[in-house]
Image (cartoon, rainbow, N blue to C red):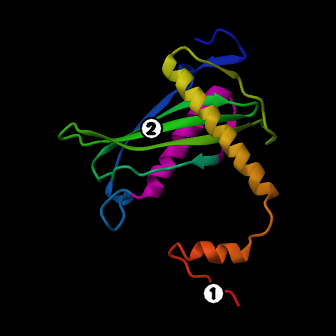
Amino acid sequence: MTTHPHFKYVTDSQVTITELMIPAYANFGGKIHGGTVLSLIDKVAYAAAARHSGSYCVTLSVDRVLFLHPIEVGQLVSLKASVNYVGNTSLIVGVRVTSEDVKSGKIWHTNSCYLTMVALDDEGNKQQVPGLKLRTEEEVRRWYEARQRRQHAMAVRKEEATRESVDIAKARELATTERCLIELS
């Protein structure tokens, strides 16, 4: 339903996957491993980014993964991914994870996070991605928030690149107010 070859609608690349949580995915506490959930998040984000870009994509970063509710063996986990923002060669994909108890029908929001993906051509070079067409207020809100997160991340990277060495005396002082003991010789 894309009307311009250089732009795609958010709905053109949205992806939902649902998977049954089996005992092999569980940790010693009987809950689903966080790593299993992260793997599924990466897969669904890739699918949305690849669908939007029309090319192979790699994960550059994962922003703020919070585990809000445990996932149990036997539950169905659904992951919904959508491209929220595009740069020149990168895409920010939002992923929402829910778990469902099929017996009771109860659904829990277990995770939300954002992944920055980079599109690559067949030689492994960065490749330009189509622009994003927004049709709803929700899509505009997600685009705006993703843009804000991107600007913040870029500012942090710039600060980290110019940061000098750590002031040990200041670190010792700060550590006295934290649960930290610095024992340098």
Q: Residues within 10 Å of mark 2 (few under 14, many from 20)?
A: some
User: Image quadrant for the C terminus?
Assistant: bottom right
Quick one: label 1 or label 2, which is nearer the N terminus?
A: 2
Q: Nearer the viewer, mark 1 or mark 2?
A: 1
Which quadrant would residue 126 be assigned to in this image?
top right
Asked if one can make out residue 57 in the rendered structure from this viewpoint, the answer is no
Magenta: main secondary structure equals helix
**Residue situated furthest top in the rendering:** 3
128, above or below 154, in the image:
above
Question: Observer-nearest residue: 62 or 154?
Answer: 154
* Residue 165 sits inside the magenta stretch: no
- Pick the residue in front: 174 or 66: 174
Give the amino acid type for the residue marked by disc 1 in the picture.
Glu
Q: Amino acid at mark 2?
A: Arg
Q: Which residue sits at x=58%, y=11%?
A: 1
Identify the residue at horizontal 36%, vertical 56% (top origin). 32
Q: Nearer the viewer, residue 36 or 115?
A: 115
Q: Secondary structure at mark 2?
A: strand
Q: Position of residue 164 (x, y in %)?
A: 80, 64
Is disc 1 placed on a helix, strand or loop? loop
Tell me whether the residue at label 1 lies in contact with that at label 2, contact meaning CB atoms closer than 8 angstroms. no
According to the image, label 2 marks what residue?
A: 96
Q: Is residue 4 left or right of residue 35?
A: right
Which residue is under mark 1?
183
Magenta residue span? 33-60
Judge whether residue 107 can be spotted in this image: yes
User: Which residue appears farthest toward the bottom when viewing the image?
Assistant: 185
Horizontal and vertical percent position of residue 72: 29, 53
Q: In the picture provided, is 136 more to the left or to the right than 127?
A: left
